[in-house]
Amino acid sequence: MRTAPGPIGLFDSGIGGATVLAALHQHMPHDDLVLLSDQARCPYGPRPAAELVRIALANTRWLLAQEARLIVVACNTASAAALGTLRSTFPGVPFVGMVPAVKPAVRASQRQAIGVLATPTTIAGTLLRDVIAQWAGDARVIAQACPGLVEQIEAGELDTPATVALLTQHLAPLRDAGVDTIVLGCTHYPLVAPTIARLMGAGVSIIDAAPAVARQVARIVASHSTAPGSGSIRYVTTGDQRGYQQLIERCGLPPGQIERIAPLDINPQPDAMINAHRSE
Ligand code: DGL
């Protein structure tokens, strides 16, 4: 019989989930964590919302099969497309998703001019529009899509000339608008935060939602159980492990074995779906 509580499960299209995992591990060092990086289907950004929902359902079913007791959708794009469906499909499972950190950015901004960097899907989606409508008030918000940036980060190109050129282009509208606060609206982007900081220069703050997500997860976990885990971390990818180890170390995570699994079936038979649903 299992004595320790199940792990906290996270999923993302790729290495972005590791930036959230790092915040969780720092905040909850005794909890067991499992990160599913769906690198076989990375990037999620250009995929239609209906497909992202099927992907998110498959990722969730896999994490539940690993006995995950809480799921963190460690991807802004998947959170915007699928969080509502996940919550209604698995009513007994606690989910925590990513929301662009516009609220803290507006509080922090002296000039009331903020930039949001995210994937094209997140920038075009209703979640960001709603968050801006709810929290921006009179602040100016420059929402900038960054096509190609996730691919550069996945390739480990965090500060190469090509990535610097891409970032310079994406940051130009934010510079022109005189923003003093930048929201990272994609979980991959903290890996290039030092490059963004250098390109924007002094006086610009960068906000990553991961620490706030970690605090929220800790609150939920504390309200369900006090039994500690062993602080283990499982790294699992559906893609190619090359370069993964280096990137998790860049996130400040301990090295570990990278498990590789086949890409998940996103069109399962109805029976398999019913068996995988939980209603604790
Ligand atoms: N980390 C994902 C996010 O937060 C990247 C999306 C993608 O794969 O395009 O949006």
Image: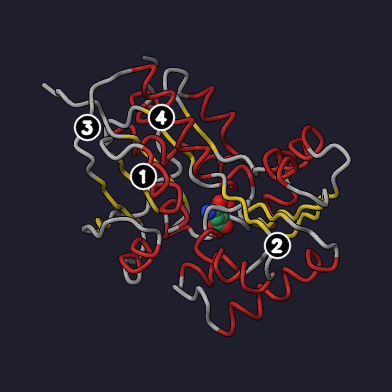
Q: Earlier in the sequence, mark 2 or mark 4?
A: 2
**Is 113 placed above or below 165 here?**
above
Tell me the crowding category of disc 1: few under 14, some 14 to 19, or many 20 or more residues within 10 angstroms, Cα based. Answer: some
What is the secondary structure assignment of the residue under circle 1? helix
Residue identified by numbered label 3: 229
- Residue farthest along the top direction in this orientation: 280
- Left or right of 56, for residue 199: right
Q: Earlier in the sequence, mark 4 or mark 1?
A: 1
What is the secondary structure assignment of the residue under circle 3? loop
**What is the spatial separation of the Cα atoms under label 3 and label 2, in whole angstroms?**
41 Å
What is the secondary structure assignment of the residue under circle 4? helix
Q: Earlier in the sequence, mark 1 or mark 2?
A: 1
Kind of residue indicated by mark 1: Gln
Q: Nearer the viewer, residue 230 or 150?
A: 230
Tell me the crowding category of disc 2: few under 14, some 14 to 19, or many 20 or more residues within 10 angstroms, Cα based. Answer: few
Kind of residue indicated by mark 3: Gly
Q: Nearer the viewer, residue 275 or 213?
A: 213
Residue at 32%, 32% in the rendered image:
68
**What is the spatial separation of the Cα atoms under label 1 and label 2, in whole angstroms?**
27 Å
Give the numbered dot on residue 218: 4
Residue identified by numbered label 1: 26
Kind of residue indicated by mark 4: Ala
Give the percent coordinates (x, y) of residue 240. Answer: 34, 66
Q: Earlier in the sequence, mark 3 or mark 4?
A: 4
- Left or right of 30, for residue 124: right
Residue identified by numbered label 2: 203
**What is the spatial separation of the Cα atoms under label 4 and label 1, in whole angstroms?**
11 Å
Quick check: marks 1 and 3 in contact, CB under 8 Å? no
Q: Earlier in the sequence, mark 3 or mark 2?
A: 2
